[in-house]
Amino acid sequence: MLISREMVLDQDIGLNGTLFGGDMMARMDMVAGITASLMSRNRRFVTLKVSELIFHSPVRPGEIIELYATVTRQGRTSLTIQIEVQVYAPVTDTHRDVTSGEFVMVAVDGNGQAETILWKAEMVQEASAMHQARKARQGQAGRKNKG
């Protein structure tokens, strides 16, 4: 599910002339929190764990990044979200994988204690359908490029 689309600005760039890795991680963490909130009726989530954060390709100033989220595991108090970031080039209507990672988010109450997630069934179903449709489109695009 597409959660965010942003343009990378000069102020986001590190010494190597590309998007600073910590900035990308912060954006991905924000998207994980937004996704958790969209999928539930809980008010607060905290990041428990980030794993497999992989930087596939650099991002340069002026490029548009799209942050996609997929819930890969639903627990009683936590959920696991796969975040995939792609650069989108509107002129050519193409995408390039740039970063991916897995985030575990925990629902917490006002005292910071874990609480049961109150799932929005309709959002979970919609997100799953959108993920399947996106994968199908990517598969079709890959077959066209090979043919």
Image (cartoon, rainbow, N blue to C red):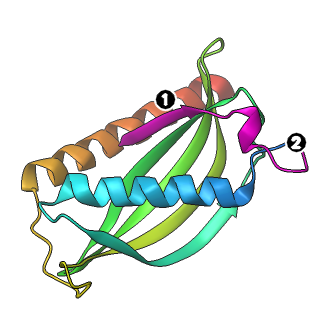
Vertical placement of residue 111 versus 140, above or below: below
Mark seen at residue 17: 2
Taking the spot 48% from the left edge, 61% from the top edge, the residue there is 29
Quadrant holding the N terminus = top left
Taking the spot 29% from the left edge, 40% from the top edge, the residue there is 130
The reply, left or right, for residue 91 in relation to residue 127 is right
**Real-space Cα distance between discs 1 and 2?**
34 Å
Q: Is 97 or 9 nearer to us in this picture?
A: 9
Q: Position of residue 134 (x, y in %)?
A: 40, 37
| Quarter of the figure with residue 77 | bottom left
Q: Is 62 or 127 nearer to us in this picture?
A: 62
Vertical placement of residue 5 versus 46, above or below: above
The reply, left or right, for residue 9 in relation to residue 138 is right
* Circle 1 SS class: helix
Which segment did they paint magenta? 1-16
Q: Position of residue 15 (x, y in %)?
A: 90, 50
Q: Position of residue 127 (x, y in %)?
A: 25, 47
- Between disc 1 and disc 2, the foreground one is 2
The type of residue carrying mark 2 is Gly
The 10 Å Cα crowd at callout 1, few under 14, some 14 to 19, many 20 or more, is few
Labels 1 and 2: the sequence-earlier one:
2
The type of residue carrying mark 1 is Gln
* Circle 2 SS class: loop
Residue 147 in view = no
Reading the image, the residue beneath label 1 is 140
Taking the spot 49% from the left edge, 29% from the top edge, the residue there is 140
Q: Is residue 36 magenta?
A: no
Residue 113 in view = yes
Taking the spot 29% from the left edge, 70% from the top edge, the residue there is 45
Q: Position of residue 23 (x, y in %)?
A: 65, 54
